[in-house]
């Protein structure tokens, strides 16, 4: 898709319609995604969970404009992913933080906004684009628990601090949508829970749309307005679960019966998906 506008989308939603992604050809052909339909409203926090290889990263890359669907439509707030990408409407937080090793924390998080003035102009020309005041990077770093690390180099930070720096950097350019692919998978459980809280605080303040891939049921429940459960072979959405727990969601909430109720619902859907995809046992 190359036009300016995109099918199926409004300025207020990300829309994926009947998306198919096929890798390889002939005997090596592999249907990674088949018939994926998703609508994500502006401002929502949506998680994607499913077995390894079911196509979560592929779906994220399609929204980011890094992969084209072989059939179907993907649109991001009324425009094609390619146009949204050029206008820097899309931010991506990968599994590893990829900071610039020669710049301190404050310079790492401030640099993208400095080099993106052309993208700012492109964004302003897109209907429905919300113009926001530039965030104070020192303030965002402090909210992420990095108030005393402005002048440290990446090599002087723990893995959790590096990941928080990458999150602040991504929020700093104020993307309309932030795509996060298992950003906390390398962290221990308690660090992870603390960073989840900081991510929620920043998301709440910035009102960004977030699409978040995770393998953790409790992480998906705590963070999300909606959890999309996927099954593999071929990858498709098998359930959409609205998480109606009140916000803010503190670490204490993780122990409540209401929280466990939502975890159980997601676990049941995952188990069904997993059973559908389980390899036949060898006699
Ligand atoms: N560039 C590619 N070329 C060929 N096959 C690919 C490519 N990228 C992904 N695949 C295949 O598509 C399927 C989905 O991959 P994807 O990385 O999206 O899965 P995932 O759900 O993110 O898995 P994980 O949880 O392990 O990260 C897998 O079977 C994978 O082997
Ligand atoms: Mg993946």
Image: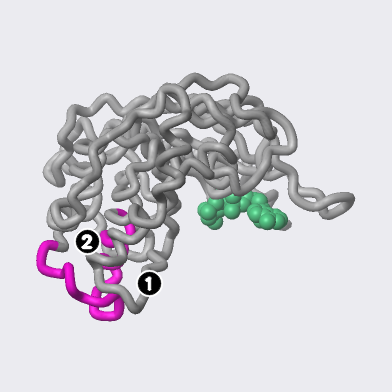
The quadrant of the picture occupied by the N terminus is: top right
Q: Left or right: 120 with respect to 19?
A: left
Q: Which residue is mark 1?
A: 100
What are the residue bounds of the magenta stretch? Answer: 147-167
Question: In 3D space, how far apart are the residues under numbered discs 1 and 2 (Cα atoms)?
Answer: 23 Å
- The numbered mark, 1 or 2, whose residue comes first in the sequence reads 1
| Image x and y of residue 69, in percent | 68, 38
Residue pictured at 69% horizontal, 28% vertical: 72
| Image x and y of residue 66, in percent | 60, 48
- Where is residue 59, by image quadrant? top right
| Residue 216 falls inside the magenta stretch | no
The answer to whether the beta carbon of the residue marked 2 is less than 8 Å from any atom of ligand 1 is no
The quadrant of the picture occupied by the C terminus is: bottom right
Residue pictured at 66% horizontal, 26% vertical: 18
Residue pictured at 59% horizontal, 40% vertical: 82
| Image x and y of residue 14, in percent | 49, 28
- Where is residue 200, by image quadrant? top left
Residue 203: image tag: none
User: Which sits in the foreground, 131 or 251?
Assistant: 131
Looking at the rendered structure, the secondary structure element under dot 2 is helix
- Where is residue 153, by image quadrant? bottom left
| Residue 153 falls inside the magenta stretch | yes
Vertical placement of residue 18 versus 104, above or below: above
Q: Is residue 47 visible?
A: no
Looking at the rendered structure, the secondary structure element under dot 1 is loop
Residue pictured at 39% horizontal, 43% vertical: 178
Residue 191: image tag: 2
| Image x and y of residue 224, in percent | 32, 35
- Disc 2: CA contacts within 10 A as few (<14), some (14-19) or many (>=20): few
């Amino acid at each position: 898709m190359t036009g300016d506008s995109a099918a199926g989308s409004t300025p207020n939603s990300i829309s994926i319609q009947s998306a198919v992604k096929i890798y390889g050809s002939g005997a090596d052909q592999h249907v990674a995604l088949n018939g994926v339909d998703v609508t994500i409203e502006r401002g929502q926090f949506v998680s994607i969970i499913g077995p390894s290889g079911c196509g979560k990263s592929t779906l994220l890359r399609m929204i980011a404009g890094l992969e084209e669907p072989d059939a179907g439509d993907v649109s991001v707030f009324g425009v094609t992913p390619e146009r949204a990408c050029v206008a820097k409407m899309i931010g991506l937080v990968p599994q590893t933080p990829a900071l610039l090793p020669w710049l301190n924390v404050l310079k790492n998080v401030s640099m993208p906004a400095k080099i993106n003035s052309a993208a700012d102009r492109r964004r302003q020309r897109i209907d429905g684009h919300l113009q926001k005041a530039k965030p104070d990077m020192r303030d965002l770093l402090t909210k992420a628990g990095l108030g005393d690390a402005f002048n440290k180099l990446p090599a002087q930070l723990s893995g959790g601090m590096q990941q928080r720096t990458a999150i602040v950097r991504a929020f700093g350019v104020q993307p309309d949508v932030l795509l996060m692919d298992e950003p906390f998978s390398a962290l221990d459980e308690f660090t992870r829970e603390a960073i989840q809280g900081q991510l929620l605080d920043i998301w709440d303040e910035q009102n960004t749309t977030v699409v978040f891939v995770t393998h953790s049921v409790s992480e998906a429940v705590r963070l999300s307005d909606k959890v999309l459960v996927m099954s593999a072979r071929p990858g498709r959405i098998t359930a959409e679960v609205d998480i109606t727990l009140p916000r803010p969601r503190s670490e204490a909430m993780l122990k409540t019966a209401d929280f466990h109720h939502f975890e159980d619902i997601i676990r049941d859907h995952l188990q069904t998906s997993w059973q559908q995809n389980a390899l036949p046992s060898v006699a």
